[in-house]
Image (cartoon, rainbow, N blue to C red):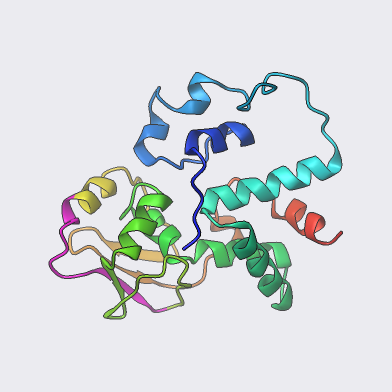
Amino acid sequence: MARNTEAQCKQCRREGQKLFLKGERCLTDKCGVERRAYPPGDHGRGRQKQSEYRVQLREKQKARRYYGVLESQFRRYYEKASRQPGITGENLLIMLECRLDNVLVRLGFASSRRQARQMVGHGHWTVNGRRVDIPSYGLREGEIIAVKAGTPIEATIRDATELTAQVPAWLQADHDALTAKVLRRPERREVTAPVQEQLIVELYSK
């Protein structure tokens, strides 16, 4: 299975802002962006020309890194979003937001998307009573998420719930029973990803 092995702190530094790829560490002074607030590489502190294409590309890369999606996956999401009724950019973000690994983070059951992907890949979560080991699984309205009975990572999940201040209104979580329900699809105003989706649409429309 293909995966991104690039250093996570470098990804945040490349985009010039925190993408919270390391969970709790991103909230401390050890955060790479806090320690070195400039892009990685020999020329990270040099002046860079801000062309229109570069701004659009950086926005697309930021979205990919934020949700932990590879380039080919991201392209497929965009193509699917463009075929759906409504605004393409909003459709794209909503599909990414409904990924199982992202929803676990939003619910507070994982401190980062990488941790969520690992837990899902190891078969620790069920959807509607059936084990799901595909992190990109797209959740739909009414589906029930629950931790697999007897899982050895319950303590890790409960530690992650302590970092969660609030669960989005489109989700319902029971942190005691470690279960949750998707109440509906999220609206654009409820998606907190630091992404300007219109720039991504402009990039792919060229």
Judged left or right of residue 177, residue 191 is right
Horizontal and vertical percent for residue 53?
Answer: 83, 45
| Residue 187 visible to an observer of this rendering | no
| Residue 77 visible to an observer of this rendering | yes
Vertical comparison of 1 with 164: above or below: below
Judged left or right of residue 106, residue 197 is right
Q: Residue at x 42, y 33 (%)?
A: 26
Residue 127 placement: quadrant: bottom left
Horizontal and vertical percent for residue 52?
Answer: 85, 42
Question: Magenta segment: does it hold 161?
Answer: no
Q: What's drawn in magenta, residue-wise?
A: 142-155
Judged left or right of residue 63, residue 203 is right
Q: Residue at x 69, y 46 (%)?
A: 59
Q: Nearer the viewer, residue 118 or 170?
A: 118
Q: Residue at x 62, y 34 (%)?
A: 14
Q: Quadrant of the C terminus?
A: bottom right
Residue 169 placement: quadrant: bottom left
Horizontal and vertical percent for residue 93?
Answer: 61, 61
Instruction: Please give the count of numbered marks on the rendered protein.
Output: 0
